[in-house]
């Protein structure tokens, strides 16, 4: 029964994550609810062991239909990998409580900005080019990579928002690009958690398959309905993240 419950959560997490990020909002709480006495690092490791496959499959699916800026995204993914590995190491020695309280406030700002700018992310019009775009995208990758390894909730959604707001991508291209970077950050964190023995491999395979199923469904819908659909899902996911992280930070 435990495996069935977390597998269903992994399917839903993969579905949401493939569209706009935020799958950890579903799978991580499910893991904590089903395994309340397990060390948090182990639960984060299990989450990464599933989500890395879902994001990787989503990235592959998007790359077949969306013209990704590989010269920009590959260095950014490498920066994200580095940042996430350092962040995952840092969480083993530093407290993250301040981020728990800051996160819902930042998310409220992201949501308010997105709602106020109704045309934001509807058209794909990159405003940076060449080395400048690579540098800015890599900076985004490094910073959010560290955040993903150190804390994590909403990383995919932050990638989408910054690619839309800073680089001028539409929501579909931003989501496709975010999947590549998020795969790198998930992989780095998973490697560190695995090296420290914080992964239950007997659960990892089943949850990975479930996450891939959800990812394929989510990617299909995003590609079918385009940027406007992704924008709506983004608003819904960020709203849910605000409620969940706000409750965790100030009411629990």
Image (cartoon, grey):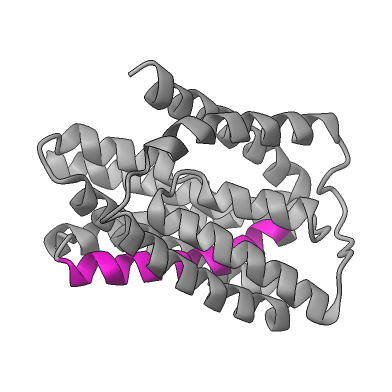
Residue 176, given in percent of the width and then of the height, sits at 64, 63
The residue at the point 41 percent across, 26 percent down is 249
Residue 190, given in percent of the width and then of the height, sits at 31, 66
Q: Name the image quarter holding the N terminus.
A: top left
In depth, the one of 66 and 162 nearer the eye is 162
Q: Residue furthest front?
A: 94
Q: Main secondary structure of the magenta part?
A: helix
The residue at the point 37 percent across, 55 percent down is 211
Q: Is residue 213 above or below residue 99?
A: below
Q: Name the image quarter holding the C terminus.
A: top left
The residue at the point 74 percent across, 52 percent down is 171
For the image, the number of numbered tags is 0
Q: Is residue 12 above or below residue 238?
A: below
In depth, the one of 215 and 121 nearer the eye is 121
Kindly indicate the quadrant of the structure image that contains residue 72. Answer: bottom right
Res 102 visible: yes
Asked whether 182 falls inside the magenta stretch, the response is yes
The residue at the point 62 percent across, 74 percent down is 76
Residue 203, given in percent of the width and then of the height, sits at 17, 57
Task: Please state if 89 lies on the left or on the right of 250 as rendered.
Answer: left
* Residue extent of the magenta highlight: 174-196
């Amino acid at each position: 029964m435990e495996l069935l419950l977390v597998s269903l959560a992994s399917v839903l997490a993969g579905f949401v994550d493939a569209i706009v990020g935020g799958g950890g909002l579903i799978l991580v709480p499910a893991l904590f609810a089903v395994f309340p006495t397990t060390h948090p690092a182990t639960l984060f490791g299990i989450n990464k062991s599933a989500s890395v496959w879902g994001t990787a499959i989503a990235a592959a699916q998007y790359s077949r239909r969306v013209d990704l800026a590989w010269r920009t995204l590959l260095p950014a993914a490498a920066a994200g990998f580095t940042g996430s590995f350092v962040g995952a190491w840092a969480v083993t020695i530093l407290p993250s409580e301040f981020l728990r309280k800051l996160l819902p406030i930042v998310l409220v700002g992201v949501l308010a900005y997105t709602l106020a700018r109704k045309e934001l992310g509807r058209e794909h019009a990159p405003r940076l080019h060449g080395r400048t775009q690579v540098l800015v995208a890599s900076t985004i990758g490094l910073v959010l990579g560290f955040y993903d390894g150190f804390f994590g909730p909403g990383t995919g959604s932050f990638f989408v928002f910054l690619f839309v707001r800073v680089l001028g991508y539409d929501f579909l291209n931003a989501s496709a690009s975010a999947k590549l970077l998020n795969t790198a950050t998930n992989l780095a964190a998973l490697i560190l958690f695995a090296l420290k023995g914080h992964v239950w491999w007997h659960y990892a395979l089943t949850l990975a398959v479930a996450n891939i199923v959800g990812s394929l469904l989510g990617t299909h819908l995003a590609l079918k309905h385009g940027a406007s659909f992704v924008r709506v899902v983004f608003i819904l996911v960020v709203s849910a993240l605000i409620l969940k992280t706000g409750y965790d930070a100030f009411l629990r």
